[in-house]
Image (cartoon, rainbow, N blue to C red):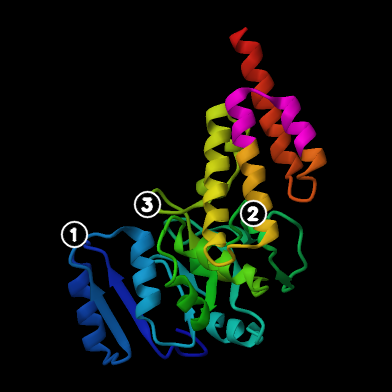
Amino acid sequence: MQTRKADEVLILDDCSKDETVSIIRRFIEDNSLSHWKLIVNKKNIGFNANFRKGLFESSGDIVFMCDQDDIWKVNKIEKMLFMLKEDILLLASGFDVIDAKDHIQDMNKNLIGSKMDEKGLYKIDINNLLRNNFAQGCTMAVRKDLIELLKKDKSCCLEHDWSLAILAALKDGCYFYNEALIEYRIHGDNTIGFEKMDHKRRNQRLLSRKKIILEEKKRVDFALQYLMYDEYLNLMKDYLDLRIECIDTFSPLKLIISCLKRFRNVADWHALLGDLISMTGFVRKSS
């Protein structure tokens, strides 16, 4: 139940093998939910394509994404619509963590990692989004204009929610509201959980470092589809290419000098330290 009802509800079934479809159809019919629509895919297309399909099928001016097993606070729609000022293209909220039995494990979490005021509104910078996602899609509300932009993405190389966040940030319209408006379920079947979002992998050795950089380069390439001649994005791409080159050639000194001379404004010094530790650690082991 919501204090502000949804005008439209889309449910996309990606070839489930149980009684999901018949249960949903019966629920819609029994409750006369004429504004609900069930779309059943003819073949399995995966969560990313399935969410994109749902976004593109939606007709509302503001669209809320939802996972199949999370719980919304009763005022989620009302509160987020109130917070969505004209300059906000995408708004994400905090979340409480629950387990498979609906027991709360943690209160008002976020993926940003910095301390924030309760119920504060924060703008998310593109520089941060190129490195790490800041929210799950199930916490987001997005404007139709942003979804229309996403339709131009032919690569589909990034998750739908991260792609939307980058696009919103490119237009200075990506925001986070620090109040838990959903209960986010963590269990073994999650497609995206905390494991994907924690960055302990940054401490792995050279192959893991390179994989991380290549993933970041994908996000820069995605953004460049929309801002091909952006000076900052092109500099970031060159910086990531340099990191890959220095890892491949074991050139920590070149990495340090180049970053100090050319890439000072885009370099992530914590990530560079990880590169350097990985490189020197690898050399010592192989000598």
Residue 189's disc is 3
- Residue at point 40% right, 75% down? 55
**Contact, CB < 8 Å: mark 1 with mark 3?**
no
Crowd tier of the residue under label 2, counting other residues whose Cα lies within 10 Å: few below 14, some 14–19, many 20 or above: some
- Nearer to us of marks 1 and 2 is 2
Magenta: main secondary structure:
helix
Would you name the residue on which mark 2 appears? Answer: 234
Q: CA distance from mark 1 to mark 3?
A: 15 Å
Which of the marked residues, 1 or 2, is nearer the chain's N terminus? 1
Residue 207 point in image, percent of width and height = 53, 29
- Residue 249: in magenta span: yes
Please give the label number shown on residue 205: none
Q: Which one is earlier in the sequence, the residue at label 2 or at label 3?
A: 3
Q: Residue at the far top: name it.
A: 287
For the residue pair 237 and 97, the one nearer the viewer reads as 237
* For residue 199, above or below residue 114: above
